[in-house]
Amino acid sequence: MVRLPSISRYKANARIILFPLLLVLMLVVTMGTGYGEAWCASSTGHQEKRGNFAKNLSKCVKEFPQKAFLDNEILTPDNVYGAEVLELYRRNGFKPVFVSNGRLNENGERLLERINSLVFDGIDVKYYSLNSIHRKIAKIRILNTILDQLKVYISSEPKIFIKRFCPVYCPEYPEIGSRAIRVAFNANDLQEHSRAAHDTCEVFFQVISTANKTLSNLNRTASDLDAALIANAFRMARDMGVENKELVLDALSRDDLDEFFKLIEPQCVHYAPLREALKSLMKKCGEPTEELSLSDKTLRPGKSGREILLIKKRLKVEGFYDGELNSYFDQELKEAVKKFQYAHGLRVDGIIGRETKEALRMPLWQEIEYLKLALSEFREEPLRDLKEGILINIPQFQLELYSNGKIIERHKVIVGKAGGKKKKLEGKLVGINQTPVLESHITRIVFKPRWYVNKRILKELEQESQGDPEYYRRQGFVFLPPRKPGGLPRVYQKPGEKNALGLVKFEFPNRYQVYLHDTPTKHLFSKSTRAFSHGCIRVENALQLARKLLELDGNAAIRSIDKYLKRKNPTYVKLNHPIPIYVRYIPASTDGEGHVIIFKDVYGRFKGKDKVDNKTMICRIEW
């Protein structure tokens, strides 16, 4: 005779096993697992659910069915990166990129870590929906915990499950459902045994169904998370200055993110030091300091007073000073002031004068904004990976010559005056003497150039001459008849030592009619603030720059420079390969050796603003 388990045994099993499962079921309901099919009471339905779960359990979320993405919120027409996300999935056979086996994989963790660090690139991460992403990660973690608990009670082999938990209810086992059992018990006993077994087995079938729903929920949540991370990868590439989406697709199709990270990181020599400076300043200055209230009195070593204490505190916060906080101007403070002056493009003398105090009055939050603005400029094309060409930074008063991605020469420059009348340019008021932001190509070098004087400067010369008829002759000016009757005469200055353009001029087409040139007033290069011209850019050691440009151009004229300089008239040398030139207004940069320098806003373009207006003021010459 086959001995059936007692009813009390079923009840004990139910108490021990079913209560934890019911808790799990309640948690699943709370998580909103509404993606599965309705529970089915038929034996065929149970068998199908068991099979589905066993199949899905081994597969988990190693890949997503194409249909799973058609309803994904990232792929709606309104989403900026929906098309790119879908294209990446098509290339990958709809396999997840940042999710593996139902969990965030290593690439996903690396991507999130880089997104979180974008604040040190000066990028606002509020558009990356990080709160939503972290909620999805937490939900996936809970769903995986639920599945792990369910696996304890459910076997992937249906027969083992049935034999263990449903010996009476299931007719698959003839020795249990045989006539011998039915005759061994009266109808009531058999009915009670069957009911208890049925109840136990029914709950487990529901657990299987719940497991399928949980797995479906996991797939959907993992799908949403993966697509959101891919969209963020495209957003980050754009924010980091990479506009070529095909390059991004190719990099994200690889097994690891090394190529992607290499692609988005700017290669400009200034970028990494600026980023580290911003990171350091943001960590040091959790709370932005107030602007220092300082007098105009010059402070020198040996002096004392409350201002010196305030300055020491400020320099200590920024890491320039590490001495005792007192009111005495000692040697340690002098050395700290020198470091501060160098870091702000000032004359390095250790004396706290007008310009140094002006820099000290700049609140730290403004220095942080300047670093953010500089990073924004250096991660955009063409500066993010400048291989060949010239970069002139107006507030830095410096020219950099690039070859093969490296700075091979640096030259001090003199730019346009900050003051004077203003005019509207691209909807903005700018000084008529200010050097404009532009992009062009140097096409020609002129040795012993003439200086053709425009109307505005001619009026200034009239005031300077003070009615002296010999003034123009002494300075080498030549008057030509006007082109039209009644017009103003044309005036140029002959080549020579007194010529305002010096010995060489670099021409590049632009709407502002400005150019790069030598100068006879070389003593002005010793000034820390060099804004003295009418808009054109004077360069120190201009002949050295001309030789280097001709050398890079492979131009045969390099062998004839000395001959050109002996001539009385100009010599025009056309370059074989026009050299790119970029004139920018960037509030911070480096000295090329990793030392970050924050510059004075010489033209006042950042007052009351949080964005550089370089892009709206650039004059681009297409080639």
Image (cartoon, grey):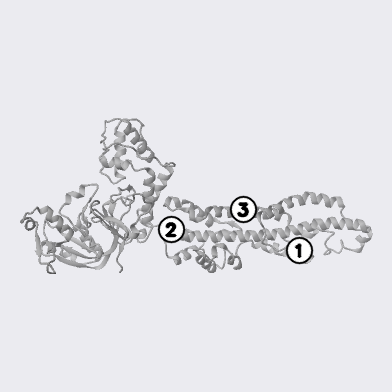
Do callouts 3 and 1 mark residues in contact (Cβ within 8 Å)?
A: no
Which element is circle 3 on? helix
Q: Quadrant of the C terminus?
A: bottom left
Q: Give the quarter of the image for residue 93.
A: bottom right
The residue wearing badge 3 is: 141
Drawn side of residue 21 relative to residue 302, left or right: right
**Which residue is at the front of the view, 605 or 561?**
605
Which element is circle 1 on? loop
Indicate the amino acid at tag 1.
Answer: Cys
The disc, 2 or 3, on the residue closer to the chain's N-terminal end is 3
The location of residue 105, given as percent across then percent down, is 56, 56
CA gap, disc 2 and disc 1: 51 Å
Q: Say the numbered circle drawn on residue 40.
A: 1
Which residue is located at x 37 percent, y 35 percent? 313
Q: Give the quarter of the image for residue 199.
A: bottom right
The residue wearing badge 2 is: 239
